Image (cartoon, helix red, strand yellow):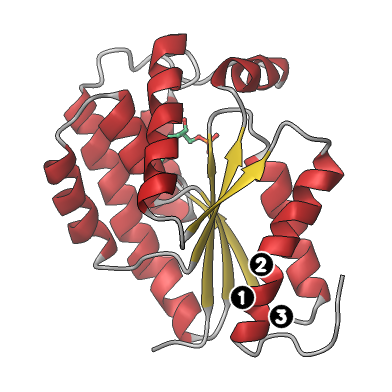
């Protein structure tokens, strides 16, 4: 058992995960905790190369199973190179996307066989499950509009709205299946309120693990 804590953020495109993850990491650091902010796909030198292939809009011929295998490869590398060592060192990990993205996007979105994805994920993650997952909820059409404002869209963002609706429904199913671990956050609210809700969800866990003692906001 490690002393670290593994927090993941999930959600549809444009839900604000990246901004919220950054603010969350800053808050945790401010509490004096050793934080590691990371993401999937694309952490580290090897992950960055895999991410390039996955998100390059020119790769229109990428087969769904190739996509899944690349994501599993990225996860295997991330777990071995970054996540396991960080947890062993007692770090608080804030990870922008992890295995729930795999089941939502490749399972519900692409329609790949869920049992095969579970095996692939198991091979890649070796049983590493987040302590808590914050699911930032936003209607997929709203998220895509927000994402479009950021500029050129990547290969996943360019998928049809139907794909994004399926994976969004998939996230709901995952949240129903794992209500203890996956906590739903209303991401349609103003940014500061989203952050406040995330902290409210995390605080009891931080207390429970003895990571914070005094009353903090
Ligand atoms: P993002 O970092 O901008 O969210 O982009 C990562 C993309 O990769 C996003 O479209 C979701 C997708 N993805 C999957 O399809 N499956 C996965 O397992 C992960 C981690 C990400």
Separation of marks 1 and 3 at Cα, in angstroms = 14 Å
Around disc 3, counting alpha carbons within 10 Å, would you say few (fewer than 14), some (14 to 19), or many (20 or more)?
some
Separation of marks 3 and 2 at Cα, in angstroms = 13 Å
- Disc 1 versus disc 3: nearer the observer: 1
Q: Position of residue 57 (x, y in %)?
A: 43, 16
Q: In front: 8, or 180?
A: 180
Tell whether label 2 touches label 1 (CB within 8 Å).
yes
Around disc 2, counting alpha carbons within 10 Å, would you say few (fewer than 14), some (14 to 19), or many (20 or more)?
some
Q: Position of residue 86 (x, y in %)?
A: 49, 76
Write down the residue under mark 3: 33
First along the sequence among labels 1 and 3: 3
Figure check: 133 above or below 32 = above
Residue 10 seen anywhere in this rendered image of the structure: yes
State which image quarter holds ligand 1: top left
Q: Residue at x 84, y 88 (%)?
A: 214
**Which label sits on residue 202?**
2
Q: Position of residue 81 (x, y in %)?
A: 39, 68
Which quadrant is the C terminus positioned in?
bottom right
Q: Secondary structure at mark 3?
A: loop
Say left or right for 214 vs 97: right
Separation of marks 1 and 2 at Cα, in angstroms = 5 Å
**Which label sits on residue 98?**
none
Q: Residue at x 64, y 45 (%)?
A: 185
Residue 50 seen anywhere in this rendered image of the structure: no
Q: Secondary structure at mark 2?
A: helix
Which quadrant is the N terminus positioned in?
bottom left
Write down the residue under mark 1: 205
Q: Secondary structure at mark 1?
A: helix
Around disc 1, counting alpha carbons within 10 Å, would you say few (fewer than 14), some (14 to 19), or many (20 or more)?
some
Tag count: 3
Locate residue 163: give its quadrant: top left
């Amino acid at each position: 058992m490690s002393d670290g804590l593994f927090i993941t953020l999930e959600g549809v495109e444009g839900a604000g995960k990246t901004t919220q993850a950054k603010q969350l990491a800053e808050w945790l650091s401010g509490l004096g905790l050793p934080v590691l902010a990371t993401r999937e796909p694309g952490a580290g030198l090897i992950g960055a190369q895999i991410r390039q292939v996955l998100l390059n809009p020119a790769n229109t011929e990428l087969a769904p199973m190739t996509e899944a295998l690349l994501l599993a490869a990225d996860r295997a590398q991330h777990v071995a190179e970054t996540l396991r060592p960080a947890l062993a060192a007692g770090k608080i990990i804030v990870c922008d996307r992890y295995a729930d993205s795999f089941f939502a996007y490749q399972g519900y979105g692409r329609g790949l066989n869920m049992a095969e994805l579970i095996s692939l994920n198991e091979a890649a993650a070796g049983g590493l499950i987040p302590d808590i997952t914050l699911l930032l909820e936003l209607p997929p059409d709203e998220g895509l509009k927000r994402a479009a404002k950021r500029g050129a869209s990547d290969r996943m963002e360019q998928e049809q709205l139907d794909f994004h609706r399926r994976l969004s429904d998939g996230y709901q199913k995952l949240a129903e299946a794992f209500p203890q671990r996956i906590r739903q956050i209303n991401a349609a609210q103003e940014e500061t309120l989203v952050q406040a809700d995330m902290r409210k969800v995390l605080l009891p866990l931080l207390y429970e693990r003895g990571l914070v003692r005094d009353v903090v906001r």
